[in-house]
Amino acid sequence: MITIIQGEDKKFAISLNLEDGSPYDLSNVTEAKVCMKNTDGTSLELTISGGSISFVDNNPLKGKLLISIDDSESSLLKKGKNLDLETELLDGGDINIIQHIKSLNVLARIC
């Protein structure tokens, strides 16, 4: 479960696995996008080309993406528990979509 507090800078990893449980080989991925819902119904879209996504340990064979979100972006996210997010990969010309159902908590600040 990923937890983000509105207004914080946050880095987190997303593991991408094949149906057999093995890591998704990201070697041929030329672009990746992670989408989360904002309070106003729009989507926050973070990308490799935008500098918000990289490979964990710079190793695409691990099947893990490192996501960076800044305070201005996290402050706009829809609050709630068990929210969904989505990863879209451009892999050798194919678009692959992986949905992470009920994997995100977005909390309001206390102070």
Image: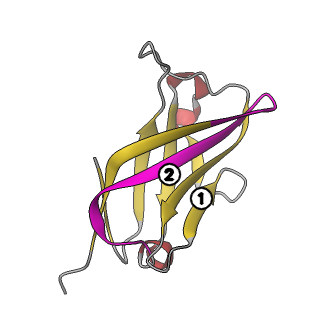
> Residue placed farthest to the top in the image?
20
Q: Which residues are magenta?
A: 77-96
Q: Is residue 48 left or right of 44 when viewed as pictured?
A: right
Q: Place residue 26 in its image quadrant.
A: top right
The type of residue carrying mark 2 is: Ile
Q: Name the residue located 60 percent from the left edge and 61 percent from the top edge.
A: 45
The type of residue carrying mark 1 is: Leu
> Residue placed farthest to the bottom in the image?
111
- Indicate whether 60 appears above or below 79: above
Task: Tell me whether the residue at label 2 lies in contact with that at label 1, contact meaning CB atoms closer than 8 angstroms.
Answer: yes
The residue nearer to you, when weighing 4 against 55, is 4
Q: Position of residue 55 (x, y in %)?
A: 57, 38
Mark 2, Cα crowd under 10 Å, few <14 / some 14-19 / many 20+, is many
Q: Name the residue located 32 percent from the left edge and 48 percent from the top edge.
A: 102
Label annotation for residue 67 = 2
Q: Secondary structure at mark 2?
A: strand
- Give the residue pinned by disc 1: 46
Q: Name the residue located 55 percent from the left edge and 44 percent from the top edge.
A: 87
